[in-house]
Image (cartoon, rainbow, N blue to C red):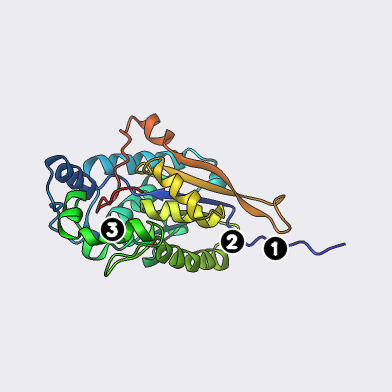
Amino acid sequence: MPEEIQQKWPQNLWIIRHGQSAGNVARDAAEAAGLPLIDIATRDVDVPLSELGEQQAVALGHWFAALPESQRPTVILSSPYARARATAQHILDHAGIDPDEVQLVADERLREKEFGILDRLTRHGIVQKYPELGEQRAHVGKFYFRPPGGESWCDVILRLRSLLDTIIREHRNENVVVVGHQVIVNCFRYLLERMDEQTILEMDRQGDVPNCSITSYEFDRTLGRKGKLAPRLVNFIVPLLEAGAPVTSEPDVPAAPKS
């Protein structure tokens, strides 16, 4: 009788974009006014949730609390950015789980994509200050373009490959929540669903990832020789709708034009 193959993946994996942040609100105001610079006094890492973002994160925690106990999170991995950590903490506080039995870990590999010299610039500001970068981005493509001092999508994907190795090694069979940023959600989907450049860019063109939406995967032992994570939810916003929390889907800053 063949030896049973050991499961290497988590049982459930939920990937969540943080709640609406003060940076999202400031970006909208700057874009509406045609300003070149987004008015944010703090570092991007320190930008907090907005009041609405807090409401969204609490609603998400209540949704997890309604799951069967066997399906509730056992591990929460979060970007170290303040808005993501606050979202993760609200999930932990309102999910009806014992905080002593759940790991809440900030992992720098889940941080926002680094924008380099484009940080805090609006679309107008990028065109005004660095027109040559717009031309380079159009030539190279959004997937590979790396602004000076910043990261490309490929750079983000590289660090997420490392994080997936950690998840496989340390959290097999567990229920894992990942709280990050819009690009983190999209790049995880690229990896887990084995997308190519054209597929992920088309997905990005279809719209922004809603704040506090859930994209989830569940281990399916029948897939492949060893089982795989199968997609279950994509940008799921029902928890917010059920709680009466407004849904927001502003892009993260800076807002470079889509291509």
Q: Give the residue number, with chain letter if any, for mark 1.
A: 6
Q: Of the residues shown, which amino acid type is indicated by label 3?
A: Glu
Q: Name the spot of residue 64 as percent of width and height, x first.
A: 45, 42
The residues tagged by marks 2 and 1 sit, at their Cα atoms, a distance apart of 9 Å
Q: Quadrant of the N terminus?
A: bottom right
Q: Is residue 184 left or right of residue 56?
A: right
Q: Name the spot of residue 115 as percent of width and height, x first.
A: 27, 62
- Earlier in the chain: of badge 1 and badge 3, it is 1
Q: Of the residues shown, which amino acid type is indicated by label 1?
A: Gln
Q: Is residue 204 above or below residue 144?
A: above
Inspect this view and state whether residue 168 appears: yes
Depth check, mark 3 against mark 2: the one in front is 3
Q: Give the residue number, with chain letter if any, for mark 3.
A: 135
Secondary structure state at the residue bearing disc 2: loop
Q: Name the spot of residue 198 as percent of width and height, x first.
A: 49, 51
* Callouts 2 and 1 close, C-beta under 8 Å: yes
- Few, some or many residues within 10 Å of mark 3 (<14, 14–19, 20+): few
Q: Is residue 25 left or right of residue 15?
A: left
- Identity of the residue furthest to the right in this view: 1
The residues tagged by marks 3 and 2 sit, at their Cα atoms, a distance apart of 44 Å
* Callouts 3 and 2 close, C-beta under 8 Å: no
Q: Give the residue number, with chain letter if any, for mark 2.
A: 172
Secondary structure state at the residue bearing disc 1: loop
- Earlier in the chain: of badge 3 and badge 2, it is 3
- Few, some or many residues within 10 Å of mark 1 (<14, 14–19, 20+): few
Q: Is residue 10 above or below residue 169?
A: above
Name the one closer to the observer, 109 or 97: 109
Secondary structure state at the residue bearing disc 3: helix
